[in-house]
Image (cartoon, helix red, strand yellow):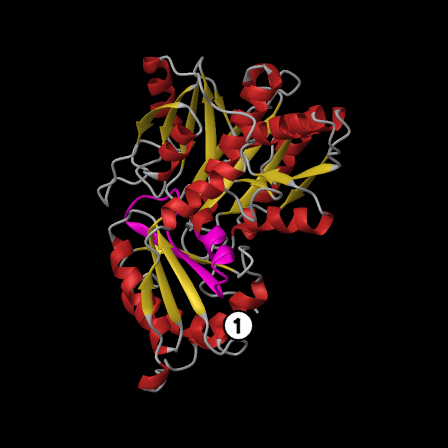
């Protein structure tokens, strides 16, 4: 059975348009509550959110839907997505819920869930929720209604957890770091973590107003961080996205390091510490240059479908620890159960301090292949695989590239676009063939 509402990372859309309406979110919480009550007599759910203005509305809707189903709710306020994962586990809650559309603009929002162990939930659970959504809303008798409370020190608990992943024998004293929180969920937490570990912190994108999340700042707009690092003469820059599960970093020269490079750097650090790294997990988007560099170190790269949940599954199946996406979702499973921008940044900074090298030196053995990505907007329901001429255009590109490149076409799981990606050792080749294929999609699509 195909999910109707759940996408790559929960349920996401434009606020006020189906399914992201208050009445649907209330029904969603009620359906989730009924699914939980099949296995738990009195479930407890934690709810966190980012800084979007619509978070207030959806928080209230979730609270009402859960309470009506007989589920207790604990409100965390604005905290990063990985903070909800951690606190769900630490508080022994039944489920964690995040109200966020991650890197999307403020007019979008979404709902995603974490298990009691702080992990993303499987497809089977999502299907059970969708089946419950087809049933009428239930309100239990008044003496069975759920209650709501607030965890007032949620941010402080998470700050201490982040710091616990950094070696107690090391500090960031002497490091000047610009932290860009994208006016999102980590706007207070990320600067506090780095400050308490000894760094001189310069804040960027830490003044949310409900409307400016991800606007011109954060991991999707690293140019703002590059400029700030150079202006302030900082040693490093850290860019998070709106819910702080994504990370890009910048060095003192203004060079941007993406998720693929950071995963490679973390693997190198572990090898330098004498640890075994049998492999790392990436995605279909992971750069061929990083794959080749890992192979030279006898480290396998396994490609999962796009989405940190799929990377997590690939790691768990093999009992590996490190994986991530080029977009900046990085998993370090012996530090946290899910992707965490702050903790990943701490692991990179720790590796750099420990090695005595800068980030570029640690990545000297890895050279990214140029990639060109073009997003082509499609009408909902378009069967892009059968578009006239598309397969012929793909074959032509693959024959021209040979072993020095690859073509990847996929539909976005979060918006109605087709992503056309071409990667090659030669940047002009990548650009040329991506444009050729994208043009064919545009001509053939209805």
- Residue 92 on the magenta segment: yes
Residue 147 position within the rendered picture, expressed as x and y whole percent measured from the top left: 33, 72
Residue 135 shows in this picture: yes
Q: Which residues make up the magenta segment?
A: 84-111
Q: Which residue is mark 1?
A: 128
Q: Position of residue 80 (x, y in %)?
A: 40, 46
Residue placed most toward the observer, 205 or 367: 205
Quadrant (top left/top right/bottom left/bottom right) for the N terminus: bottom right
Residue 283: x and y in percent read: 61, 41
The percent position of residue 197, horizontal first and vertical second, equals 44, 29
Mark 1 residue element: helix
Residue that lies at the very extreme toward the right in this rendered image: 298
Name above or below for residue 221 compared with residue 84.
Answer: above
Left or right, 34 with reference to 67: right
* Residue 437 visible in the picture: no
Residue at the bottom extreme? 141
Q: Residues within 10 Å of mark 1 (few under 14, many from 20)?
A: some
Task: Say if the magenta span includes residue 16.
Answer: no
Q: State the residue at coordinates (43%, 28%).
A: 238
Relative to residue 307, is residue 190 drawn left or right?
A: left
79 up-or-down from 20: above or below? above
**Left or right: 330 with respect to 215?**
right
- Residue at image x 37%, y 34%? 192
Query: Residue at image x 24%, y 45%?
Result: 210
Quadrant for residue 45, please give it: bottom left
């Amino acid at each position: 059975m195909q999910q109707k509402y759940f996408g790559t990372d929960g349920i996401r859309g434009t606020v006020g348009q189906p399914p992201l309406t208050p009445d649907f979110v209330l029904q969603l919480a009620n359906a989730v509550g009924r699914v939980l009550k099949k296995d738990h007599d009195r479930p407890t759910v934690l709810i966190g959110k980012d800084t979007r203005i619509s978070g207030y509305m959806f928080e209230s809707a979730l609270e009402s839907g859960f309470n009506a189903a007989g589920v207790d709710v604990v409100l965390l306020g604005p905290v990063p997505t990985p903070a909800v994962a951690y606190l769900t586990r630490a508080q022994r809650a039944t489920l964690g819920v995040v109200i966020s559309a991650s890197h999307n603009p403020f007019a979008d929002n979404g709902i995603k869930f974490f298990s009691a162990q702080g992990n993303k939930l499987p497809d089977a659970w999502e299907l059970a929720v969708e089946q419950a959504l087809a049933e009428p809303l239930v309100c239990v008798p008044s003496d069975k209604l759920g209650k709501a409370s607030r965890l007032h020190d949620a941010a402080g608990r998470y700050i201490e957890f982040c710091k616990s992943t950094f070696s107690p024998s090391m500090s960031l004293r002497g490091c000047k770091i610009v932290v860009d929180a994208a006016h999102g969920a980590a706007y207070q937490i990320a600067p506090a973590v780095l400050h308490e570990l000894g760094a001189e912190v310069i804040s960027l994108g830490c003044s949310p107003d409900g409307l400016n999340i991800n606007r011109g700042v954060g991991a999707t707009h690293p140019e703002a961080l590059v400029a700030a690092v150079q202006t302030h003469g900082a040693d490093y820059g850290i860019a998070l996205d709106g819910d702080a599960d994504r990370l890009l970093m910048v060095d003192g020269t203004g060079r941007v390091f993406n998720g693929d490079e950071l995963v490679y750097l973390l693997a190198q650090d572990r090898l330098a510490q004498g640890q075994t790294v049998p492999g790392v997990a990436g995605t279909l988007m992971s750069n061929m240059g990083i794959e080749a560099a890992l192979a030279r170190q006898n480290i396998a790269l396994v490609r999962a479908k796009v989405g940190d949940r799929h990377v997590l599954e690939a790691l768990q199946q093999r009992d590996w620890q490190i994986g991530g996406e080029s977009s900046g979702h990085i998993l370090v499973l012996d530090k946290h159960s899910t992707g965490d921008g702050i903790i990943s940044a701490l692991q990179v900074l720790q590796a750099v301090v420990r090695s005595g090298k800068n980030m570029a030196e640690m990545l000297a053995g890895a050279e990214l292949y140029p990639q060109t990505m073009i997003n082509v907007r499609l009408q909902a329901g378009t069967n892009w695989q059968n578009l006239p001429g598309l397969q012929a255009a793909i074959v032509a590109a693959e024959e021209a590239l040979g072993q020095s490149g690859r073509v990847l076409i996929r539909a976005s799981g979060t918006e109605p676009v087709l992503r056309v990606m071409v990667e090659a050792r030669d940047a002009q080749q990548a650009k040329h063939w991506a444009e050729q294929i994208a043009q064919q999609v545009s001509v053939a699509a209805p």
